[in-house]
Amino acid sequence: MDNKGPQIPIITDLIESQVVAAVNSPEKLEQAINSNCNVAFLMTGDILSVPASVKKLHDNGMKVFVHLDFVDGIANDRSGIKFIAEKVRPEGIITTKNHLIKFAKKEGLITIQRLFFIDKSAIKKGIQMIESSNPDAVEILPGVIPRVITRLTDVTPLPIIVGGLIENEQEISDALEAGALAASCGSPRLWHTDL
């Protein structure tokens, strides 16, 4: 008998468009659905609205990752993760919190560790965090630092997603060229980018 836990899909197999719709307001749900993106990072809502938002995105063929740090009313503990896995049923979660990555993996969710790289010590601490939590992918912010993207891809085999401060297609292209798997963008204008 195999005791390895649930089989978790590989995030690189889910991402078709290298631009991810970072849905940061309920009004942007429809725009995400009508975009070229096939993955959405849901960064808005609460315990009552998130299940319906995830269902709507799923019904329209999108893969969904719930950003736990932005959802109101769901505890940052094992029970909150269990609720997300059993009642909301996204493909995975995004969080800055190491302990939630570990809980989510046990529930069969794909995990993305979000890191803010503001200086060299933050980069060093971020690398330690991903070694400790062992997420399925890493999202780094800001996403407009190709040199840091390249450095991180040199030290970890994990897929890198970039986000934050991305304003145009060239910045997305630069991040992808530096080794990023995808770029999460909050601007619906960029959700129609073909990359």
Image (cartoon, grey):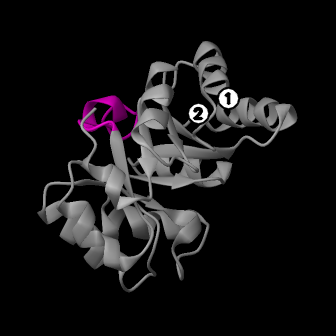
Residue 90, image quadrant:
bottom left
Q: Which mark is residue 134?
A: 2
Taking the image as shown, residue 39 lies to the left or right of residue 42, namely left
Magenta segment range? 1-18
Q: Which mark is residue 131?
A: 1
Taking the image as shown, residue 130 lies to the left or right of residue 137, namely right
Q: Secondary structure at mark 2?
A: loop
Residue 95, image quadrant:
bottom right
Q: Which mark is residue 55?
A: none
Instruction: State yes or no: residue 17 in magenta.
Output: yes
Whether tag 2 and tag 1 are in contact, CB under 8 A, the answer is yes
Residue drawn at point x = 49 percent, y = 52 percent: 104
Residue 37 position (above or below residue 158): below
Q: Main secondary structure of the magenta part?
A: loop
Residue drawn at point x = 47 percent, y = 66 percent: 43
* Position in image of residue 40 (x %, y %): 33, 55
Q: Which one is in front, 56 or 76?
A: 56
Taking the image as shown, residue 84 lies to the left or right of residue 97, namely left
